[in-house]
Image (spheres, coloured by chain):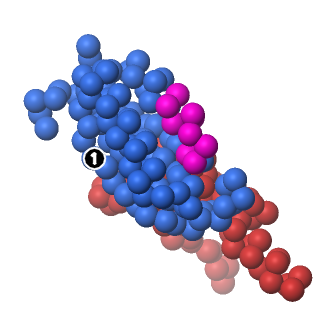
Chain colours: A blue, B red
């Protein structure tokens, strides 16, 4: 299937433990690489940052940016998984490239 | 006698500097294109070209969604802190 390159910025609860956050990310890696045969590219941890406005009564949040190549239909599943967790406050998925080949990276 | 005011020629900062990232992940740059109250400043004022202004407003809106920038000062964490400070 045709792969596209996406990026998702996720805002986590700042009080969350590292282990829990890691579990969510590992879960997503599985979806990307095993279920949809895509490729996980980057995990960019921004750390805890001050928010511009309070979200879920928190003034700080932990941002993690991830990049991956998957077919378009995988996004629905990834976002569904994110929505299930209460410690994921917000997320935003952006398409970076229309074409993506695993071999290129 | 009559002094004619000639404003400085405006230019699009994103066209002039191709390496300047126009991205929702860089609120530090986007902040220069909003007012103190968070409104997006028009093209007439900043001189941004049409193409980049469209992109700019999209990126600002994305940054707002992700709490990287505020929608309006009422929501702003900084302002809320000040208000609370006054009450105490």
The answer to whether residue A29 shows anywhere in this view is: yes
Q: Which residues are magenta?
A: A80-88
Give the total number of marks visible in the rendering. Answer: 1
Please indicate whether residue A26 sits to the left or right of residue B73 in the image: left
Front one among B18 and A6: A6
- Residue B25 image offset from top left, x and y in percent: 44, 55
Q: Is residue A4 left or right of residue B50?
A: left
Instruction: Look at the image and tell me whether residue B54 can be seen.
Output: no
Residue B79 point in image, percent of width and height: 75, 73
Residue B45 placement (x, y as % from top left):
61, 60
Q: Quadrant of the C terminus of chain B?
A: bottom right
**A22 above or below A85?**
below
Could you say where residue A25 lies in the image, as x and y percent from the top left? 38, 43
Which residue carries the number 1 mark? A42
B1 to A53, vertically: above or below: below
Location of residue A71 with respect to A84 vertically, above or below: above
- B47 lies left or right of A95: right
Closer-to-camera residue (B61/B19): B61
- The image quadrant of residue B73 is bottom right
Disc 1 crowd, CA 10 A, few/some/many (<14, 14-19, 20+): few
At x 60%, y 59%, the residue is: B69
Q: Residue at x 67, y 79 (%)?
A: B2
Indicate yes or no whether the magenta region holds residue A96.
Answer: no
Residue at 61% of width from left, 43% of height from top? A86
């Amino acid at each position: 299937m045709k792969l596209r390159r996406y990026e998702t910025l996720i805002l986590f609860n700042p009080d969350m433990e590292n282990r829990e956050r890691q579990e969510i990310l590992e879960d997503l890696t599985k979806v990307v690489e095993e279920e949809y045969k895509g490729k996980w590219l980057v995990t960019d941890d921004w750390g805890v940052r001050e928010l511009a406005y309070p979200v879920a009564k928190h003034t700080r949040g932990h941002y993690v940016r991830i990049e991956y190549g998957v077919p378009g239909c995988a996004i629905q599943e990834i976002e569904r998984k994110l929505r299930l967790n209460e410690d994921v406050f917000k997320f935003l998925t952006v398409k970076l490239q229309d074409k993506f080949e695993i071999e290129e990276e | 006698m009559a002094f004619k005011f000639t404003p400085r020629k405006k230019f699009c900062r994103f066209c002039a500097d191709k390496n300047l990232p126009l991205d929702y992940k860089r609120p530090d740059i986007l902040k220069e294109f909003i007012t103190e109250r968070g409104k997006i400043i028009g093209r007439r004022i900043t001189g941004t070209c049409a193409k980049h202004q469209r992109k700019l407003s999209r990126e600002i809106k994305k940054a707002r969604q992700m709490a990287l920038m505020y929608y309006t000062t009422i929501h702003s964490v900084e302002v809320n802190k000040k208000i609370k400070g006054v009450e105490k």
